[in-house]
């Protein structure tokens, strides 16, 4: 526990908490609070930046390794897949069975197995998986793109080619998506689709690069970074929610929210916390299980079961749902995630670059 970065644990806790609380109110009370849905979206954006930050540090270390070989990339993929896929597949097939038996009919859709369920629009069944499809395609494509620039950069500077390749990939994805959104503004194209959100995690890559170039920062500077990130978050929220913003200005939400989220992650990473709350650390460790269980596994079934109940009873159900989801997620982490994490270590620890 003490080897973990508490700031990053806090960022994970905030991200999953924002998504969890918004979904719980929406589902248990059968109502959407005006503008409140943005909290969930902000939580997902924070997840994206955090993911990019962590993966960015791994990829940058991999390509900076003097012994780097292209065959190291499949090792990276194997480690990512053993972390993400087992629980995801278990949950998908469990929900498919339980929903067909007790809630409403759902057809098997192979796009969920290929992480293409978000290729056109946000899925209605197992809806929270839309963000995972973006992450998985990012993990698959970005190392290959970095590898391409890695060899191109060797013609310019062999000494710094890893950094050049890394930053070219991150900034290239961001600029490409900014240009695309401006060109397609008002066209009705789903900007949350997989291929149009590859930049969401790229902001975290840049934060990862900064963290490796500047290993330490004072708490004062860290707080300033956090405040700057929150200010950009607020500005992005205004862009997203205001009906007065025109179609060509609204897409600026994505870079503003991405930079704000990455700055928040970076500031929390640098900040030296004197006190650590174990609940935050444990919640961070089981956050992936919470993300996959809370909505489709608990809140949607509860929303159907509690239709017509009075407000006081709904409040009790709402309160009980929190420890129930947390305990289910803890069991999921222990019996599904941990065994595959152990398997991952056994299969790849000797092959992992830099070890």
Image: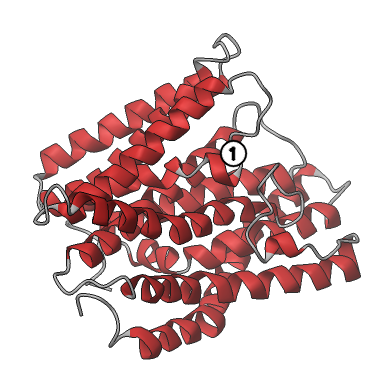
Q: Position of residue 82 (x, y in %)?
A: 48, 77
Q: Residues within 10 Å of mark 1 (few under 14, many from 20)?
A: some
Q: Quadrant of the C terminus?
A: bottom left
* SS state under label 1: loop
Query: Which scheme is used to colour this image of the protein?
Result: secondary structure
Q: Quadrant of residue 171?
A: top left
Exactly how many numbered labels are in the figure? 1
Q: Position of residue 274 (x, y in %)?
A: 17, 57
Q: Position of residue 295 (x, y in %)?
A: 67, 56
Q: Quadrant of the N terminus?
A: bottom left
Q: Which residue shows up at 74% across the image and 43% down it?
A: 29
Compared across the picture, whether 30 is left or right of 326 comes to right
Q: Which residue shows up at 56% across the image and 79% down it?
A: 331
Residue 6 makes an appearance in the image: yes
Q: Which residue shows up at 57% across the image and 8% down it?
A: 244
- Which residue is at the front of the view, 338 or 63? 63
Compared across the picture, whether 332 is left or right of 72 comes to right
Q: Position of residue 320 (x, y in %)?
A: 65, 60
Q: Which residue is mark 1?
A: 192
Compared across the picture, whether 196 is left or right of 115 comes to left
């Amino acid at each position: 526990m003490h080897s973990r970065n508490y700031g990053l644990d806090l960022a994970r806790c905030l991200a999953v908490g924002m998504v969890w609380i918004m979904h719980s109110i929406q589902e248990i009370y059968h109502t959407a609070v005006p503008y409140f849905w943005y909290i969930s979206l902000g939580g997902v954006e924070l997840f994206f930046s955090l993911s990019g930050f962590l993966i960015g540090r791994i990829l940058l270390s991999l390509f900076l390794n003097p012994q780097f070989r292209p065959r190291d990339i499949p090792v990276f993929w194997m480690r990512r897949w053993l972390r993400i896929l087992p629980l995801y597949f278990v949950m998908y097939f469990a929900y498919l069975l339980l929903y067909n038996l007790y809630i409403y009919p759902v057809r098997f859709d192979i796009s969920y197995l290929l992480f293409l369920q978000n290729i056109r629009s946000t899925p209605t069944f197992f809806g929270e998986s839309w963000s995972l499809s973006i992450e998985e395609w990012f993990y698959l494509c970005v190392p290959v793109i970095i590898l391409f620039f890695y060899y191109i950069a060797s013609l310019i500077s062999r000494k710094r080619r890893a950094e050049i390749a890394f930053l070219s990939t991150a900034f290239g994805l961001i600029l490409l998506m900014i240009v695309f959104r401006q060109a397609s503004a008002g066209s009705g194209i789903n900007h949350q689709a997989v291929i149009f959100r590859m930049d969401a995690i790229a902001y975290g890559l840049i934060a990862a690069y900064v963290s490796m170039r500047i290993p330490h920062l004072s708490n004062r500077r860290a707080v300033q970074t956090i405040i700057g990130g929150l200010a950009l978050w607020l500005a992005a929220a205004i862009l997203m929610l205001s009906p007065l913003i025109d179609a060509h200005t609204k897409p600026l939400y994505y870079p503003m929210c991405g930079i704000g989220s990455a700055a928040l992650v970076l500031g929390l990473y640098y900040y030296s916390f004197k006190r650590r709350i174990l609940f935050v650390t444990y919640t961070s460790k089981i956050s992936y299980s919470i993300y996959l269980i809370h909505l489709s596994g608990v809140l949607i079934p509860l929303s159907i079961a509690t239709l017509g109940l009075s407000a006081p009873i709904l409040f009790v159900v709402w309160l009980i749902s929190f420890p129930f989801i947390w305990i289910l997620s803890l069991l999921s982490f222990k019996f599904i995630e941990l065994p595959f994490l152990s398997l991952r270590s056994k299969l790849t620890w000797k092959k992992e670059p830099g070890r």
